[in-house]
């Protein structure tokens, strides 16, 4: 049976986008279809770089074309990450998403989550920046094994440092001795943070991840005054005693109109050498916070020595040991985060297209 181009197009138009669950034809994201000697070449735009979304769209395309007798499909997937709402005064017009990692509680793993998620998003092929807004105790220089002082090309804007393909900024890069203690007064904190946003040459980014210090939410407040955040990720641990401060950060976000994208439960459980899970700190913290926040629980990261060891050595676990349980957990959370960002955008705009630009990444899936 000869394959007909019109039939192929018709079948592809009906394929549903995995995030929006609407047909590609209605969304306008089927960008091109070619047929040559029984081989179909299709170009589709998706709004999340997540592996899951890519695999799902590929499976759906194959399933749609199989009944037509097509047995070779070349899929050209263009990822266009959606953009947050930005006003004309926005200091970061080329940064599509600004995501704050916060908790209220100290030591729950905010910096670990921020760095590993940034790297996992980078590994999906997106453009990522990471801002260490913890000016009392910057940890990104250690966690990413990077020191040095940023330079400026024009004497006005600061060039971020780079590591593992991510743009980075931390107060740690500006100190003579990163271990020195600094006494900051409120207005100085405010000013330093503003400078990190306005005076750093972040360029075009799909995601700017911001690691915040523990505490009341000064960073969220300053940022929310300055720009429209895509949203916040709340980090918690499973135990009950840790939750009170975390609830406060959720309320803070709600007051500031910062959407809560999702919750990450860190140090959830320990997996022993026999593969048995032990809930060292109890369970349920992540689910409780997620329910309180009305947001999804993105995932649970096990407590694992390699997380701390790799963090101390300057190569986060996602990069150093992506196949480890913690590495897999962070990658899956990054996938879910990217999907959630796309979904929130869709709910806000009703499916308006992400802008074309230098951002979209191509991925060829051959079968
Ligand atoms: N899943 C994990 N398994 C093992 N160790 C972890 C895990 N997550 C974080 N850690 C370790 O716990 C310590 C605290 O983590 P981290 O610095 O990320 O927390 P934080 O919330 O940013 O702390 P602070 O409030 O001081 O900024 C670090 O030594 C880190 O390596
Ligand atoms: Mg920290």
Image (cartoon, rainbow, N blue to C red):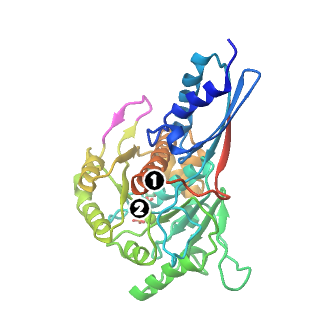
First reached walking from the N terminus: tag 2 or tag 1: 2
Picture coordinates of residue 21 (x, y %)?
44, 38
Residue at 34 percent of width and 47 percent of height: 297
Picture coordinates of residue 18 (x, y %)?
48, 38
| Image quadrant where one finds the N terminus | top right
Read off the magenta span.
Answer: 272-279
- Please state which of residues 56 and 280 is positioned toward the viewer in this rendering: 56
The answer, for residue 212, to whether it is visible in the render is yes
- Please state which of residues 208 and 179 is positioned toward the viewer in this rendering: 208
As for residue 285 lying within the magenta part, the answer is no
Picture coordinates of residue 157 (x, y %)?
65, 80
Disc 2 and disc 1 in contact, CB within 8 angstroms: yes
Q: Residues within 10 Å of mark 1 (few under 14, many from 20)?
A: many
The answer, for residue 367, to whether it is visible in the render is no
Q: Give above or below for 46 relative to 242.
A: above
Using residue 55 as the reference point, say whether residue 103 is left or right of it. left
Q: Where does label 1 land, which residue? A: 341
C-alpha span from label 2 to label 1:
9 Å
Q: Tell which residue pokes out farthest to the top in this image.
A: 1
Q: Give above or below for 192 relative to 117.
A: below
Residue at 67 percent of width and 72 percent of height: 148
Residue at 64 percent of width and 68 percent of height: 203
Q: Residues within 10 Å of mark 2 (few under 14, many from 20)?
A: many
Q: Where does label 2 land, which residue? A: 231
């Amino acid at each position: 049976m000869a394959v007909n181009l019109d039939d192929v197009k018709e079948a592809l138009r009906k394929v549903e986008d995995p995030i929006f669950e609407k047909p590609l034809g209605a969304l306008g994201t089927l960008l091109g279809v070619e047929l040559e000697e029984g081989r179909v070449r299709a170009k589709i735009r998706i709004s999340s770089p997540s592996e899951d979304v890519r695999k799902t769209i590929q499976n759906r395309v194959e399933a749609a074309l199989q009944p037509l007798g097509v047995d070779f499909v070349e899929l050209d997937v263009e990822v266009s990450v959606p953009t947050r709402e930005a006003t004309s005064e926005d200091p970061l017009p080329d940064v599509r998403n600004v995501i704050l990692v916060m908790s209220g509680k100290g030591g729950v793993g905010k910096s670990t989550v921020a760095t590993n998620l940034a790297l996992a998003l980078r590994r999906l092929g997106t453009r990522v920046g990471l801002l260490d807004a913890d000016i009392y105790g910057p940890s990104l220089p250690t966690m990413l094994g990077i020191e040095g002082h940023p330079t400026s090309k024009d004497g006005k804007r600061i060039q971020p440092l780079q590591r593992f393909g991510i743009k980075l900024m931390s107060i740690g890069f500006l100190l003579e001795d990163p271990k020195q203690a600094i006494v900051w007064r409120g207005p100085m904190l405010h000013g330093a943070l503003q400078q990190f946003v306005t005076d750093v040459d972040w360029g075009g980014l799909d995601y700017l991840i911001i690691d915040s210090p523990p505490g009341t939410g000064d960073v969220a407040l300053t940022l929310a005054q300055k720009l429209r955040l895509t949203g916040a990720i709340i980090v918690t641990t499973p135990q009950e005693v840790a939750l009170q401060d975390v609830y406060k950060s959720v309320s803070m976000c709600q007051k500031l109109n910062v959407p809560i994208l999702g919750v990450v439960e860190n140090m959830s459980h320990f997996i022993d050498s026999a593969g048995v899970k032990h809930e060292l700190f109890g369970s349920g913290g992540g689910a409780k916070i997620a329910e309180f926040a009305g947001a999804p629980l993105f995932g649970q990261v096990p407590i694992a020595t390699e997380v701390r060891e790799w963090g101390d050595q300057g190569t986060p676990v996602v990069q150093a040991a992506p196949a480890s349980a913690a590495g897999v957990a962070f990658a899956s959370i990054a996938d879910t985060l990217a999907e959630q960002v796309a979904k929130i955008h869709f709910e806000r705009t009703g499916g308006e297209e992400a802008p074309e630009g230098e951002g979209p990444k191509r991925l060829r899936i051959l079968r």
